[in-house]
C-alpha cells in the first residue's frame, strides 16, 4: 500500500490533543460509541487525540464516496462500512484527514461533531459473525510444544500450513471487560479421575485481531495478491484461556470450553491504511520449508509483515489497593509471526470458505524469540512450575481473582508519527455458583 498525504509526518491537527497522543491525525482508527449514561444508539466514530468524530453527525460535511462511507459508518455497527471495501474507508480517511488538519476550512463545522472520549461508552465495533483463531507465532507454538512434547515440540505441519480453529464469537467483549472465572471438567494429573470446578490455571493470550472487510462468495478462494483488499483493520485481542480445562478437553478436536468463555478486544480498529508506514519484510528462514505457491508472493515477502510493538501488563488487586502501577510482563513485536495477515486470509478461503464483513481472525498468541517476549503466563512460568515474582512480593503461576491484564500496542519508526491501538483491559472475577 502506497503512502499518501494522510501519512505525512509533518501533518498536524487543529485538535490540540492529537499531537503526541496515540491517536494523531496519521492514525484515525474506527470504533463504535455512544455518550456515557445515555440510551443513545451506538454509532460509528473515529478517534482523534482525546476526542471522537461522530460520523453520523459529520456525514453531511463530506461528499461522494466519503459521504456514503460516513453514512454507512454511522450505523450501530461498522459492518456495512467494512463490506464497502478499501476504497470507501480510504476515501473517508482522506476526507477526515483534510477536515481535521491544522488550517482546515472545515474546523468550525467539524468541531461541533466531536465527543470527548472520557464522555463516551465504547461498544463492539462490528457484529462478529464468525471468529477464527490462528497459531501464527512459531515461538509460542514451540514454547507450548516443549511443555507437552519435550522431544517433539513443533508438529510437522506447522511450518507448512497456517493452523487455526473456529472459535465462538458470542463471548467476544470490548475493553474494559470483567468476567467470571470459568468452571469446567478437569483431570488432576495424567492418571487422575476427572472432576468439576472453577479453573485454577487461568491465563491470558496476547494476540492481534484482524477484522474482515469485504467478503468473498462461497466457493471463491481469495488470491494472496488480493487478500488485504479483504481486511479492514487490526485491534488488540486477549483470548483468555483456562489451561486446565483446555488441557483435558483439547484432544483430538482442539479448543472448546477452555477458550469460549471470554475474549476481549480493544475498542478501536486501526485500519490497514494507517499501518502503511509500518510494514516490514516477511522473512522465512532459509532452512525452513518455503510457503507453497498459493501462500507466496513477491509483495508478501517484501512487505507482508507489520512492525507492531506489543505489551502486556498485570495489575493485581493488591497493587490496585496500594496504588502501585501495573507491572510489565512482556514486550514483543508482531513482526516475529510465522504467517502474515495475507497468508491467514488466503489459507482461510482456499477451500472456498466464505468470509463476511465483520468476521474476526485472531493471530494466535504472539511471542518473540527472546526472554521477556512471551505472550502468555503458561510460557513465562514454564507451565506454572516457575512462578513469576512481582515487584510487590506477590507471585503468580496463573491469574488470580481480581487480577487485571492490560494489553497495549503501538507502531513507531523513524520518519513516521507513532500511532497506538488503545488498550485491551480485562479483569478476572470469582467464579459464579
Image (spheres, helix red, strand yellow):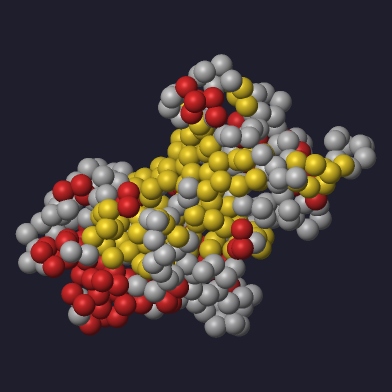
Quadrant of the snapshot with the C terminus: top right
Give the x, y percent position of residue 423.
42, 46
Is 326 on the left-hand or right-hand side of 51?
A: right
**Image-based side of 156 in relation to 288, left or right:** right
| Residue 55 x %, y % | 29, 69
| Residue that appears at 38% across and 50% down | 421
Where residue 165 appears, x then y in whole percent? 67, 60
Q: Residue furthest top?
A: 393
Q: Residue at x 39, y 61 (%)?
A: 38
Residue ID at (50%, 77%): 215
Q: Position of residue 330 (x, y in %)?
A: 50, 33
Q: Is 177 rendered above or below residue 388?
A: below
Determine whether, in the image, residue 103 is placed left or right of residue 54.
left
**For the view shown, which residue lies furthest in the front direction?**
38
Q: Is 192 rendered above or below residue 252? A: above
Q: Quadrant of residue 153?
A: top right
Name the residue nearer the viewer: 300 or 22.
Answer: 22
Q: Is residue 259 visible?
A: yes
Q: Where is residue 379, by image quadrant?
A: top right
Amino acid at each position: 500500500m502506497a503512502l499518501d498525504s494522510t501519512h505525512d509526518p509533518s501533518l498536524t491537527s487543529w485538535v490540540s490533543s492529537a499531537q503526541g497522543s496515540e491517536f494523531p491525525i496519521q492514525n484515525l482508527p474506527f470504533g463504535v460509541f455512544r455518550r456515557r449514561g445515555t440510551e443513545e444508539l451506538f454509532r460509528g466514530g473515529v478517534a482523534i487525540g482525546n476526542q471522537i468524530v461522530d460520523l453520523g453527525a459529520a456525514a453531511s460535511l463530506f461528499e461522494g464516496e466519503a459521504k456514503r462511507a460516513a453514512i454507512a459508518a454511522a450505523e450501530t455497527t461498522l459492518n456495512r462500512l467494512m463490506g464497502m471495501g478499501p476504497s470507501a474507508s480510504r476515501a473517508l480517511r482522506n476526507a477526515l484527514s483534510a477536515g481535521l488538519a491544522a488550517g482546515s476550512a472545515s474546523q468550525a463545522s467539524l468541531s461541533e461533531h466531536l465527543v470527548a472520549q472520557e464522555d463516551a461508552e465504547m461498544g463492539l465495533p462490528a457484529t462478529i459473525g464468525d471468529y477464527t483463531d490462528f497459531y501464527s507465532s512459531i515461538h509460542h507454538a514451540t514454547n507450548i510444544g516443549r511443555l507437552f512434547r519435550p522431544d517433539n515440540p513443533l508438529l510437522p505441519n506447522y511450518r507448512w500450513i497456517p493452523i487455526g480453529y473456529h472459535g465462538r464469537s458470542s463471548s467476544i467483549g470490548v475493553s474494559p471487560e470483567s468476567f467470571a472465572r470459568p468452571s469446567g471438567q478437569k483431570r488432576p494429573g495424567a492418571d487422575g479421575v476427572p472432576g468439576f470446578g472453577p479453573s485454577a490455571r487461568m491465563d491470558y493470550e496476547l494476540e492481534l485481531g484482524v477484522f474482515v472487510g469485504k467478503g468473498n462468495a462461497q466457493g471463491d478462494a481469495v488470491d494472496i495478491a488480493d487478500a488485504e483488499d479483504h481486511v479492514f483493520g487490526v485491534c488488540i485481542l486477549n483470548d483468555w484461556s483456562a489451561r486446565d480445562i483446555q488441557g483435558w478437553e483439547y484432544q483430538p478436536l482442539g479448543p472448546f470450553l477452555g477458550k469460549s468463555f471470554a475474549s476481549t478486544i480493544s475498542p478501536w480498529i486501526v485500519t490497514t491504511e494507517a499501518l502503511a508506514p509500518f510494514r516490514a519484510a516477511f522473512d522465512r528462514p532459509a532452512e525452513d520449508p518455503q510457503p507453497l505457491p498459493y501462500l507466496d508472493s513477491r509483495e508478501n515477502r517484501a512487505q507482508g509483515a507489520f512492525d507492531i510493538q506489543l505489551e502486556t501488563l498485570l495489575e493485581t488487586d493488591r497493587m490496585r489497593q496500594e496504588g502501585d502501577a501495573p507491572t510489565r510482563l512482556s514486550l514483543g513485536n508482531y513482526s516475529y509471526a510465522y504467517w502474515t495477515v495475507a497468508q491467514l486470509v488466503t489459507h482461510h478461503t482456499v477451500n472456498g470458505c466464505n468470509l463476511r464483513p465483520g468476521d474476526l481472525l485472531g493471530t494466535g498468541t504472539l511471542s518473540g524469540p527472546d526472554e521477556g517476549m512471551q505472550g502468555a503466563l503458561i510460557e513465562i512460568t514454564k507451565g506454572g512450575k516457575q512462578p513469576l515474582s512481582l515487584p510487590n512480593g506477590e507471585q503468580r503461576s496463573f491469574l488470580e481473582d481480581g487480577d487485571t491484564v492490560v494489553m497495549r500496542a503501538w507502531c513507531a519508526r523513524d520518519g513516521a508519527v507513532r500511532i497506538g491501538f488503545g488498550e485491551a483491559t480485562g479483569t478476572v472475577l470469582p467464579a459464579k455458583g
